[in-house]
Image (spheres, grey):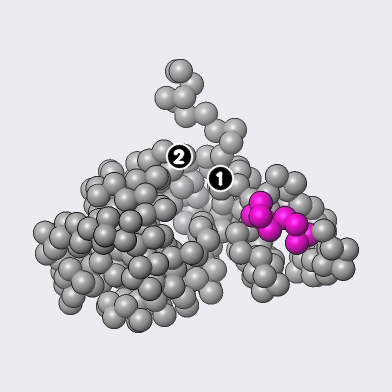
Amino acid sequence: MVKEMSNKYLKLVHSIKKLESVAVAFSGGVDSTLLIKACKEALDENAIALTIDSPYIPNWEIEEAKDLAKNIGIKHEIIKLNEIPSIIKNNPYNRCYLCKKTLFTMMKERSKALGYTYLIDGTNFDDTKVYRPGIKALEELNIISPLLENKLTKNEIREISKQLDLSTWNKPAYACLLTRFPYDTYLESKNISIVEKAEEYLMSIGFLGLRVRKHKDIARIEVSRDERKKLFNEKLLDDISDTIKAIGFKYVCFEASGYRSGSFDKNIITEDESNE
């Protein structure tokens, strides 16, 4: 198993070397962290990590991205986005596509200005098997996805990251904060901040895989299935309720089935699916 993963990583590094000069869309997640590690090894000074700092990315994630890039030794630049793009203000069903198109256009323009030949991202092989509307935007912009091209799955990426002693190897998946709001909900910075604070609180008391979905005044909390048993504690439930309400919610409830990625996407029927 170790040899197999080592060979897959070496193949990834070799494929990146062929690109000669790259900028990496870097979020600080499991996938993009392995990618900047491979880019540093393959291209050294001919690689840079680009991170978007937007109103809907938690501050802690930006700081973590800075630390990861510094530890790996790759050049790193933060691109500041001060406002939610008007095109996604109403959180339309194709928000992810529109957002990706906007942010990756920004990064592509910046990478070109800095003199890098390609902009690459951390889309992996598993991403093609679930609802990922943003992938269409990447294809339209000719963004290269080395992890996908090398058919690396999420589990393989975690295993390789573990072998490379990357601290992100077991990091829970963490999507942007806009995924916490129902579609067709007007997005306001103050509400995004409330969600961010609520999730930071839950992480501070030991929950790892979690989401706080905002339904008007209601916080619908999702925790990973194996962490649900922690909630069978009256004192903890009281503390969570009091704290989340103090942050800005009126009501607090829990999703009995636990955390599930893309829970607001379950009612979306794509054109291809509607023809089945």
Q: Quadrant of residue 7?
A: bottom left
Residue positioned 32% across, 50% down in the render: 152
Say whether residue 230 is magenta.
yes
Query: Label for residue 214?
Result: none
Task: Work out whether mark 1 precedes mark 2 in sequence or the reverse, and give the earlier one.
Answer: 2
Label 2: which residue?
130
Q: Out of 244 and 236, give the one closest to the viewer.
A: 236
Asked whether the beta carbons under mark 1 and mark 2 sit within 8 Å of each other, the answer is: yes
The residue pinned by badge 1 equals 262
Residue type at numbered disc 2: Val
Q: Is residue 56 left or right of residue 68?
A: right
Residue drawn at the location 41% of the way across and 80% of the way down: 67
Residue 228 placement (x, y as % from top left):
72, 55
Q: In the image, what residue type sits under mark 1?
A: Gly
3 left or right of 185 in image: left
Quadrant housing residue 66? bottom left
Q: Which residues are magenta?
A: 223-231
